[in-house]
Image (cartoon, helix red, strand yellow):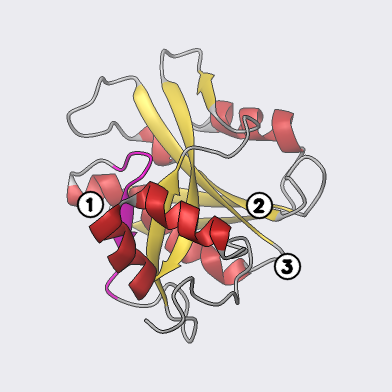
Amino acid sequence: MNRYQDVRDFYTSKMGEPVREALFVKDEFKIGILKWSASVATGGVTLYGTLGSSDYPLPGRHWGHRQEFFIGFAPEWDDIAEPLAQLGSYTQFRSANLESGHTLRLPVELVEETWLRGFLVVEPLDDVLSRVALGDGRHVEFLMAIPLYSNELDFAAKRGAEALRDAMSEKNIPFWKARRRSTFIDG
């Protein structure tokens, strides 16, 4: 049994078997991406989740505290798999933790020609994927990733993640759509 089988089993207990799997490897780090088709169990979006982030300890945290990340889109957007894997391995390459409310700016667009430049990491909006205690003593928290434009990242850096989420909500920005407009059209 591989180390992340228990996390995969947790995902499966919540959403069924994934319809697609991919593996991304960089140096000694391996991060899988699982995909589930839109359904009631996924909140009506195609869901993508990391698998393997929780195999690695978080710098400066209790050894048992681990994380996995997920993101949902309607319609599906398979191009997000590699950027999500990068998010899943971020703490290992940067020795910096990501917590709810943190943003991560990437040096290039998440996916070519989208202008999306990073992620906002937040606690899940519902408790379908929140936390799980594993048999080996690890406690895995699942964090939702929201892709952001540069001007949204700038806004969050100045005013905070909650202010950005409020602005997105006020303007009815569908963060689950891959080809959405920016919250701040004029930059």
- The residue to which callout 2 is attached is 47
Give how far across and how far down residue 36 sits, in percent.
Answer: 72, 50
Give how far across and how far down residue 89 sits, in percent.
Answer: 34, 50
Q: Nearer the viewer, residue 17 or 40?
A: 40
Q: Is residue 61 above or below residue 181?
A: above
* Mark 1 Cα-neighbour bin, 10 Å: few <14, some 14–19, many ≥20: few
Q: Residue at x 19, y 51 (%)?
A: 94
- The residue to which callout 3 is attached is 75
Q: How many marks?
A: 3
Q: Quadrant of the N terminus?
A: top right
**Element type where label 3 sits in the image:** loop
> Depth-wise, is mark 3 or mark 1 nearer the camera?
3
**Element type where label 1 sits in the image:** helix
- Majority secondary structure of the magenta segment? loop
> In 3D space, how far apart are the residues under numbered discs 3 and 1 (Cα atoms)?
31 Å
**Does label 3 or label 1 sit earlier along the sequence?**
3
Q: Quadrant of the C terminus?
A: bottom left
Give how far across and how far down residue 18 sits, in percent.
Answer: 71, 47
Q: Is residue 129 above or below residue 163?
A: above
Residue 185 horizontal side relative to residue 58, left or right? right
Magenta range is: 98-107
* Mark 2 Cα-neighbour bin, 10 Å: few <14, some 14–19, many ≥20: many
The answer to which image quadrant residue 108 occupies is bottom left
**Label annotation for residue 44:** none
> In 3D space, how far apart are the residues under numbered discs 1 and 2 (Cα atoms)?
25 Å
